[in-house]
């Protein structure tokens, strides 16, 4: 019994020693992700219940230990924490334009380089279509899909710019698919 206690204390001290000797406080990205996930359960009462459960079942403790011993040490030696991967995919369209698919917030960023600088537009999914914003968050356009497959396009002030029938939307879909 005493031997088992000494072994547990020794392992705990070794873990603390390894973390202290690495000289890296670290960003604790994994714990941040667990905390962010905990905030998605619902209202404050459900989030609190989830928080308690995730502490009784030692989710936070395991994430903290993995962060402290493994991920923050990797961050110290390499400069990058594996848990903070950006989760973005960049797709080059041509020499001057790229699409960036952002997994973190589900948006798409269109960047185009011109002689006068770089122009960027953010495409955000809405319940009935897509919203186009500039990088400051100003709504530039909105596209709404009808239940019949039609599409309505509005400018930033909400004024209707164009209507497309379901047949026109289907035709555009086929043209863009076959042109690749």
Image: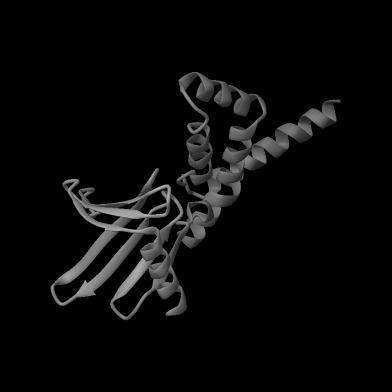
Left or right: 95 in relation to 55: left
Q: Which residue is drawn at 20% across and 48% down?
A: 138
Left or right: 67 in relation to 105: right
Reply above or below: 53 against 115. above
- Residue 143: tell me if it is visible: yes
Percent of width and height locating residue 141: 24, 53
Of residues 113 and 61, which is closer to you in this image? 113
Q: Residue at x 75, y 33 (%)?
A: 8
Of residues 180 and 147, which is closer to you in this image? 147
Residue 127 picture quarter: top left
Of residues 160 and 12, which is closer to you in this image? 160
Residue 120 picture quarter: bottom left
In this rendering, the count of numbered labels is: 0
Q: Which residue is drawn at 64% across and 41% down?
A: 15
Residue 20 picture quarter: top right
Q: Which residue is drawn at 83% across and 26% down?
A: 2
Percent of width and height locating residue 72: 52, 49
Residue found at the far left of this picture? 116
Left or right: 152 in relation to 101: left
Residue found at the far top of this picture? 45
Q: In which quarter of the image is the N terminus?
A: top right
Left or right: 91 in relation to 57: left
Q: Quadrant of the C terminus?
A: bottom left
Of residues 144 and 113, which is closer to you in this image? 144
- Residue 180: tell me if it is visible: no
Percent of width and height locating residue 115: 15, 77
Percent of width and height locating residue 163: 27, 56
Rendered image coloring scheme: one colour
């Amino acid at each position: 019994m005493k031997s088992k206690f000494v072994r547990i204390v020794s392992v705990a001290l070794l873990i603390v020693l390894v973390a202290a000797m690495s000289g890296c406080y670290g960003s604790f990205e994994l714990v941040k992700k667990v905390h962010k996930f905990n905030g998605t359960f619902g209202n404050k009462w459900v989030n609190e219940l989830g928080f308690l459960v995730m502490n009784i079942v030692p989710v936070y403790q395991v994430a903290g230990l993995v962060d402290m011993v493994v991920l923050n040490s990797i961050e110290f030696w390499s400069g990058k924490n594996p848990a903070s991967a950006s989760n973005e995919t960049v797709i080059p369209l041509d020499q001057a334009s790229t699409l960036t698919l952002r997994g973190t917030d589900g948006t798409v960023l269109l960047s185009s380089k011109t002689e006068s600088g770089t122009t960027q537009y953010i495409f955000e999914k809405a319940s009935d279509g897509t919203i186009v914003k500039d990088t400051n968050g100003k709504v530039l356009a909105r596209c709404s899909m009808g239940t019949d497959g039609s599409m309505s396009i509005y400018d930033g002030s909400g004024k209707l710019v164009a209507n497309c029938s379901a047949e026109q939307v289907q035709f555009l879909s086929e043209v863009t698919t076959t042109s690749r």
